[in-house]
Amino acid sequence: MMKRISILCLALLLALFYSFTEHHQEQVDFSRMERRMLHIPTAGLFDHYDYFTVAPSDMRRDGWCLPVEDGVLFTPEFPHETVGWYIMSPEPRHEVKAAMEGVVRLVRKTNLGKTVVVLHPNGMETVYAHHAKTLVSSGDYVSAGQPVALAGADHGMVYTYFTMMVNGVPLNPSTLVRPDGTLKDEMAVFSLGGDGMVRVSLCAIGAVAERAPRFDWMETPAVVDLDRPFSAMERQHVGVATPGLFEHASSFTVDLARVGKWSYPLPGAKVISPYGGKRKNHTGTDLKTRPKDKIRAVFDGVVRFSGKYSAYGNMVVVRHANGLETCYSHNAKNLVKAGDRVKAGDAIATVGRTGRATTEHCHFEVRVNGVPFNSDYIFDHANHVLKNGMLTFTRKANGRISIKAE
């Protein structure tokens, strides 16, 4: 009997693992070619402009770190690639870490040995090769500093080959990074020539147009400036318009398949009252677990409002660069304050029943320009997963906003 129970438990754990793995691999749906080829153009990189820029601040935003902690650069005496860095590890099977956050595009054996390629929000890719063991799979989201492999041994030493790529073209890390791992001060401008080759030039910060195009595939190109200080109105009220949201166009699109890292607002919760509700005036989705469970930020963003708000009780509103805002209310305690930057999955509050509530739960809302809409557009609440369609928000002449889901 105990043996049968153990087998059932093992089967359940395996099913949960594969479900989790498949879900995260679906966040960025790389083509078969992208998963197999080392040097391949990056989809969408030059779709709208024939150049884009990467500043040191962009790399720091993505968490830049040297992939081999305490590693030493060396020039091999054996035949080697001339573009990248060879980094000697201090010990066998030393961890090789992601230089920046991103999604793993390729994991396979190449002419460089066991190789991992990570695609980053700033448009660049990083390559890690010559491993004893890889620790990630294609499609995995990785944070900066997360181990992706274990360094391999050869020629009497333990080392890792590290380089960068832009649109499939190798780029020597020395172009942007000093040998000690610190970032250089110049901004890199990557341009696509008529011959299809990518060229890089360096210039002082501010020497190019202030709004020079950036590439950011991990979320919809930013339509909201999160660095702009919030006004007193924005810090004190929930339903306010988002400045700049429809400044340049009457519509914008959020591609849920490319938002990068995300989190379900209350892991393990069940829906006790859907959007609309019995009286058709319920503006959110009520999620219930246990009192004082931690409520998580859905996407990266900045806390716009944190405090008590009428019948909502303790409430947190997070503004995201993709133009959306997410709201979490009836909280027992808010763990963040207005102006705080949060990452997807960060704990921002605990479950409570403050305000007008009959039981401990999280009232979760998604808003655009201050107006709530059904969070079913964003989440499959039954399975706690993010949907992967495209949502287009259009402001009509009467000020109302329509939503088209694809």
Image (cartoon, grey):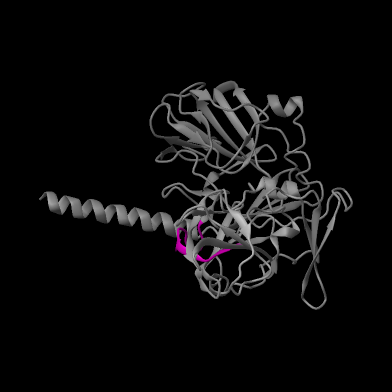
Report whether residue 81 is seen. yes
Place of residue 26 in the rendered image (x, y in percent of width and height, measured from the top left): 50, 60
How many labels were placed on the picture? 0
Residue at the (61%, 53%) spot, across then down: 99
Residue 148 magenta: no
Q: Quadrant of residue 300?
A: top right
Place of residue 313 in the rendered image (x, y in percent of width and height, measured from the top left): 54, 22
Q: Quadrant of residue 22?
A: bottom left
Place of residue 390 in the rendered image (x, y in percent of width and height, measured from the top left): 61, 57
Place of residue 404 in the rendered image (x, y in percent of width and height, measured from the top left): 63, 55
Residue at the (49%, 21%) spot, across then down: 354
Q: Is residue 99 left or right of residue 354?
A: right
Q: Is residue 221 left or right of residue 102?
A: right
Quick check: 61 above or below 116? above
Q: Nearer the viewer, residue 173 or 98?
A: 173
Q: Nearer the viewer, residue 115 or 276?
A: 115
Quarter of the image with the C terminus in it: bottom right
Q: Nearer the viewer, residue 124 or 277?
A: 124
Q: Nearer the viewer, residue 209 or 256?
A: 209
Quick check: 405 above or below 290? below
Residue 130 magenta: yes
Q: Quadrant of residue 267?
A: top left
Q: Specify the segment rendered in magenta.
A: 127-140
